Amino acid sequence: MNRSLSIAGYVLGAALFTGARALAGITLTADLSHSNETAQGPLTTVGGDPRPLSFGTATFTLNDAMTAMTFTATIFNIDVTGTQTPDPNDNLVAAHIHASPTAMAGANSPVVWGFFGSPDNDNNPDDLVVTPFASGVGGTFSSKRDAPEGNGANTLASQLDNILSGHSYINFHTVQFGGGEVRGFLVPSVPDSGSTLLLLGFTLFGIVGFQKKLGVRVTQGGAR
């Protein structure tokens, strides 16, 4: 076999292996808003005055074996400590992942994993870290849903179909909206095609470099 082709195959194989490892795992995102909730209405204080609209974002990552799912969520204008504002209506009381085969906009689904308040299924081990904003109202939540954890029989393995098909959502519940003030469905991210093209570009560059190092002439008709 032509030596340059053999080395080219090696370089391509190594690059594709590296790229596959880099793209391993599945990332999902969620945009949280009050308009996604089934029970909507003006956000108010106990006295009836309007309060700022709450919202947030979240990113989830399934590991290669799909046995654990880490996440980071940041929410705004929800009091995560109970002391960020003087009014209790915006106090956070619970946060969960909900899912079912029929989960969709305009419908509620049961809790499959709770990580704040009740139920608290983040316990094997407890990975939750809550970081309130240094100023302002809200904070960042990060944790990991481990394989044994789940509300009842709802382990991660039993919910993978719902998660990957867009039938699960993250929900933050407050005093005013006990059924949920902000919600966002988990949506799988589209792979970064730019990274793939960059990888292939480096692969071709490497092939040409190896050919030159071996003293192989590269012409329009091929190497000879």
Image (cartoon, rainbow, N blue to C red):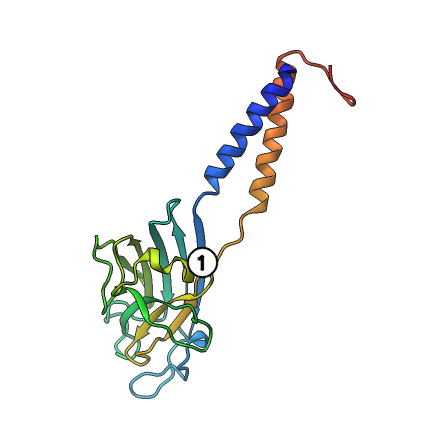
Q: Is residue 79 left or right of residue 196?
A: left
Q: Could you tell me how many numbered marks the image carries?
A: 1
The residue at the far bottom in this view is: 48
Residue 219 in the image: above or below residue 183: above
Side of 195 where 84 appears, left or right: left
**Where is residue 197 drawn, in percent x and y?**
61, 40
Q: Quadrant of the C terminus?
A: top right
In the rendered image, residue 72, in percent from the top left (x then y), is placed at 36, 56
Q: Residue visible at 45% across and 74% down?
A: 36
**Which three-letter amino acid code belongs to the residue tagged 1?**
Leu
Image coordinates of residue 170 in percent, x first then y, are 37, 66
Residue in the picture at 31% in, 81% down: 176
Q: Where is 51 relative to 148, above or below?
A: below
Which sits in the foreground, 52 or 115? 115
Q: Nearer the viewer, residue 17 or 202?
A: 17
- Is the residue 222 above or below the residue 59 in the image? above
Quarter where residue 1 is shown: top right
Horizontal and vertical percent for residue 93? 26, 72
Is 75 situated above or below 3? below
Q: Quadrant of residue 219?
A: top right
- The one nearer the camera, 56 or 222, is 222
Kindly give the residue lying farthest to the top in the view shown. 215
Quadrant of the rendered structure where residue 116 is? bottom left
Q: Does residue 106 appear left or right of residue 152 in this picture?
A: right
Residue drawn at x 53%, y 31% is 15
**Label 1: few (<14), some or many (≥20) within 10 Å?**
some
Please, what secondary structure does the residue beneath circle 1 have? Answer: helix
User: Which residue matches tag 1?
Assistant: 164
Q: Residue at x 41, y 56 (%)?
A: 59
